[in-house]
Image (spheres, helix red, strand yellow):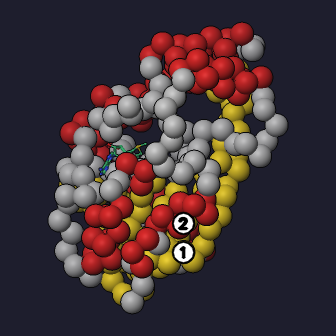
Amino acid sequence: MPDPQHFDRHADLYDRARPPYPDALGKRLAELGLLVASHRAVDLGAGTGQATGILVDAGMDVTAVEPGPALAARLRERFPDVHVVRDTAEAVKLPPASFNLATAATAVHWFDLDVVLPKLHTALVPGGRLAVWRNAYGDRSVPVTPFRDRIGQIVARRGAPPRRLPDEADTSRWATLLQAGGYFEPVHLEDFHWSIELDEDAVRGLFTTFSDWSVAEAEQAAEAARDLGGTVTEHYLTPLIVLARTD
Ligand SMILES: C[S@@+](CC[C@H](N)C(=O)[O-])C[C@H]1O[C@@H](n2cnc3c(N)ncnc32)[C@H](O)[C@@H]1O
């Protein structure tokens, strides 16, 4: 069973091993008018600040919500001007009508949306936006690489339980979940396709950060990279869903 505390136990590694979001995503957020200097943004499940940094770089006034103590400490160190709140998205107290933008990056699948969506509706100003995105590690629109084949074998051996939530790459089903209750309506859906080269150490580190991977499995993934020449190309997908707060 994936454990949300997994990331906090691996805070240093998470910071080093997780690849950043593609530049094209940040550009699109700006083009959509979401990144506005001095506008207020709240980043939920901020981790080590991969998404928080995009908001900070745009000059926004940022609140970062993160339940993990080690991760929250890292956020405070990295972003002294960000208001870091150590709490969950469900329990955090957000002042009403105070944010122009809420973001959840590779985090929304951890939230109880029945609680979080109405809370964000109250916390956002009229016309406010909710932007949700995540890195999906593996892109099924690309032919299966030998490395992805080996990853598939490791996962198959695990005999994972059936999924409780839609597949991470199923952007339209996630958009449907995010408009439940009528608090938000999707205004922009987009998939970003990108790739990265990872060596054996990078594979070991990255897969160790995944909450559903054991250390032994991450080692098997590193072995696969070694067997395949030491460096592998990974094709990733980053679905972006932007929703408008309903009036
Ligand atoms: C995969 S990490 C993503 C971190 C960061 N947003 C990023 O883009 O790199 C998921 C984060 O969600 C946090 N998290 C898990 N459950 C949460 C909850 N109920 N409320 C808020 N954050 C939560 C975890 O502590 C972790 O930092």
The reply, left or right, for residue 208 in relation to residue 202 is left
User: Is residue 56 in view?
Assistant: no
Residue 115, compared with residue 219, is above or below; it is: below
Residue 108, compared with residue 130, is above or below; it is: above
Question: Image quadrant for the N terminus?
Answer: top left
Residue bearing mark 1: 186
Q: Residue at x 52, y 17 (%)?
A: 217
Q: Residue at x 42, y 84 (%)?
A: 246
Nearer to me, 207 or 59: 207
Q: CA distance from mark 2 to mark 1?
A: 6 Å
Instruction: Assess whether mark 1 and mark 2 are in contact (beta carbons under 8 angstroms).
Output: yes
Tag count: 2
Nearer to me, 75 or 57: 75
| Name of the residue lying farthest toward the right | 143
Say what amino acid the circle numbered 1 marks. Answer: Pro
Q: Position of residue 188 (x, y in %)?
A: 60, 73
Q: Position of residue 200 (x, y in %)?
A: 61, 17
Q: Quadrant of residue 84?
A: bottom left
Say what amino acid the circle numbered 2 marks. Answer: Ala
Residue 37, compared with residue 206, is above or below; it is: below
Instruction: Give the secondary structure at mark 1.
Output: strand
User: Sequence-wise, which precedes: disc 2 or disc 1?
Assistant: 2
Instruction: Give the secondary structure at mark 2.
Output: helix
Mark 1 nearby-residue class (10 Å; few <14, some 14–19, many ≥20): some
Q: Quadrant of residue 119?
A: bottom left
The reply, left or right, for residue 43 in relation to residue 230 is left
Q: Residue at x 24, y 36 (%)?
A: 70
| Name of the residue lying farthest toward the front | 162
Question: Image quadrant for the C terminus?
Answer: bottom left
